[in-house]
Image (cartoon, rainbow, N blue to C red):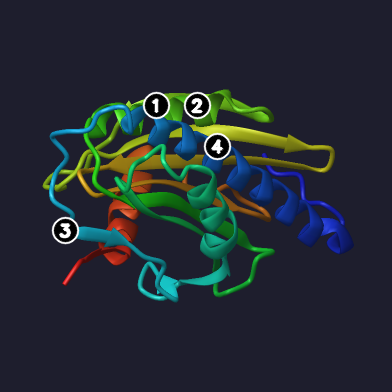
Amino acid sequence: MILPPPKKSRVGLVIGITGGVFVVVMAILLTLVMIRAKAESGFPEAKFALVLPGTVLEGRYELTKDLSDTLGRKLEKESTGIWDAKVTHFVVGRYSPGGDPTKGALLITGFYGRFKNADETRATALKRDGEADGAEVDVPPRDVTPAGSPVRISCEVLIRKRPTLTITYPVCAWADGNTSALMANMTFGARNADLDLKSAARTTLEVRSETVKSIS
């Protein structure tokens, strides 16, 4: 159950929690890139990129923070020579319902380029996210791929606590030959984010359809 914080402190708490998630996920993604970079052959052709449109989910969520040029660029510079051009770009974005960050946050963190072992990448990302400081696993990761999906989707439920705020939220991941991302869906206020993992997977697949674009 979410414990609503005092009105004046809500924005600070929201930013603190979502910011912490960004840092954790970025560390996870960098680790995955370093692991993948050890192999030098057998990479698929680069056909798709991961982008951050102005809105997702039929316009219901607006992009309120794009950290691709800060955290993303920093990681790219730090990992020069490690991924050997297999990763093209890191994408880090926060979306909020109607553009209001006090109502919730849909966090998308990922990268695009050329990758192998998609199943391992997806599973490792969720496992390490659940093991991160400040996170408690409520529902372990499991495959909840919607029927007809072009990629496998796995999701888990995590809990993050602060003195006046507890958030229980789903985290889903996908990975394919060109894109890999984690999506955390947090709701602030009287109810939690959708904790039906099958529903969360469908939402993730919809977001993927809006953020993965063909390279022309």
Distance from disc 3 to disc 1, alpha carbons, whole Å, reads: 24 Å
For the residues bearing labels 2 and 1, Cβ distance under 8 angstroms: yes
Q: Is residue 30 left or right of residue 105?
A: left
Residues 29 and 137: in front is 29
Distance from disc 2 to disc 1, alpha carbons, whole Å, reads: 6 Å
Say few, some or many: other residues with alpha carbon within 10 Å of mark 4 (under 14 / 14 to 19 / 20 or more): some
Camera-side mark, 2 or 4: 4
Which residue does the image show at 53% across and 27% down from the upper left? Answer: 130
Q: From this viewpoint, is residue 12 visible? A: yes
Q: Is residue 89 left or right of residue 4?
A: left
Tag 4 or tag 2, which sits nearer the N-term?
Answer: 4
Residues 91 and 78: in front is 78
Tag 1 or tag 3, which sits nearer the N-term?
Answer: 3
Residue type at mark 4 is Ala
Camera-side mark, 3 or 2: 3
Q: Is residue 44 left or right of residue 24?
A: left
| Quadrant the C terminus occupies | bottom left
The numbered disc on residue 128 is 2
Which residue does the image show at 46% across and 39% down from the upper left? Answer: 29
The numbered disc on residue 182 is none
Query: Taking 111 as reference, is 79 above or below it?
Result: above
Q: Label 1 belongs to which residue?
A: 124
Query: Taking 89 as reference, is 158 above or below it?
Result: above
The numbered disc on residue 27 is 4
Which residue does the image show at 14% across and 48% down from the upper left? Answer: 150
Which quadrant would residue 167 be assigned to in this image?
Answer: top right
Residue type at mark 3 is Lys
